Amino acid sequence: MMLEHKVNSYNNVEITADCTRSRRATPISVQDFERLLWMSLQQWKKDGRKGVWVRIDKECVDLVPVAVRCGFSFHRADRDSIVLNAWIGSKDEENRMPLGPQFYVGCGGFVLNSKNQVLCIQQKSGPSARMKGFWMLPGGLVDRGEDLKAAVVREVKEETGIDTEFVAVAAVRETHHTDTFGGISNSGTTDFYCICCLRILDEGQEIVVQESEISACKWMDLDEFLGSKYYRQKGTVFHEMHHAAANVAKGLRDGLGGSTLKYGRSVPGSSTVYTTSNL
């Protein structure tokens, strides 16, 4: 007897038995789960499988120590479940099970109006809140399953009340976090921060500040914004990113426009592709 499962295209087993899920129709004791898991692992090894994946919901957390005793390692977790994996390939083979997700994607919206003013904010909390006189672009993290171009429009609307549309990605910053730099919440992750140029839909629209997160919001002359002590030093992250975004917003250089495209042929689904317009 084995746990219900399927074999994916990488010759890895994905355990599908509902005994690990919160709405399980067939409750199982810890002892029975451990017995079935050991039996299943032995059979999968004989079948030449390479790795095993299992998702365990928080309501079934008593099964996690069982999986660890059987050789599973933690891969990732969210609010409701934890995913573990185990390498069961030959001892002569290198463990090729991937590490957990390590990337955050953040975005800032560069909105330039016809008066050559940029929309900017000051935050109530976070590192920038301790920086005297620091004005920044509205933005935030891209949600799970959300496209970058949708996220930046949403974040600008939430924080400032201003409606916009996506134009192009202007600049991307890549930062690798350590305990010292990012703290325990970000340690070991890589942060991609993307400045995106947006087009305002109604210049007569009033600013509505998101009071829970934003302490101030205003339109600032672009020259004043770029000339502040945080953005004027050449060769620094802040200078290069924001001056590049200004050039894209003014049409002086190309950014990366976003299009949702199908894969074509027999490959199902679609993805958003960011490319220059002059291909």
Image (cartoon, rainbow, N blue to C red):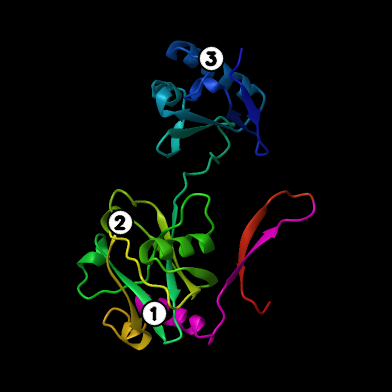
Which residues, given as a range, are shown in magenta? 237-265
Which residue is drawn at the image coordinates 49% and 15% (left, top)? 33
Q: Mark 1 points at which residue?
A: 118
Q: Earlier in the sequence, mark 1 or mark 2?
A: 1
Q: Position of residue 75 (x, y in %)?
A: 46, 38
Q: Mark 3 points at which residue?
A: 26
How many numbered discs, if any?
3
Which corner quadrant of the image does residue 259 belong to?
Answer: bottom right
Specify few, some or many for label 2: CA neighbours under 10 Å numbering under 14, 14-19, or 20 or more: some
Which structural element holds mark 3? loop
Distance from the alpha carbon under mark 1 to that under mark 2: 29 Å
User: Can residue 232 be seen at all in this image of the molecule?
Assistant: no
Q: Where is residue 57 in the image (x, y as percent from the top left)?
A: 45, 28
Which residue is drawn at the image coordinates 34% and 51% (left, top)? 187
Along the viewing direction, whichever of 71 and 166 lies nearer the viewer: 166
Which structural element holds mark 2? helix
Q: Which of marks 2 and 3 is nearer the N terminus?
A: 3
Which of pointers 3 and 1 indicates the residue nearer the eye? 1
Q: Would you say residue 68 sits in the magenta stretch?
A: no
Q: Do the residues labelled 1 and 2 touch (CB within 8 Å)?
A: no
Q: Mark 2 points at which residue?
A: 182
Which residue is drawn at the image coordinates 45% and 12% (left, top)? 29
Q: Where is residue 175 in the image (x, y as percent from the top left)?
A: 39, 63
Distance from the alpha carbon under mark 3 to that under mark 1: 58 Å
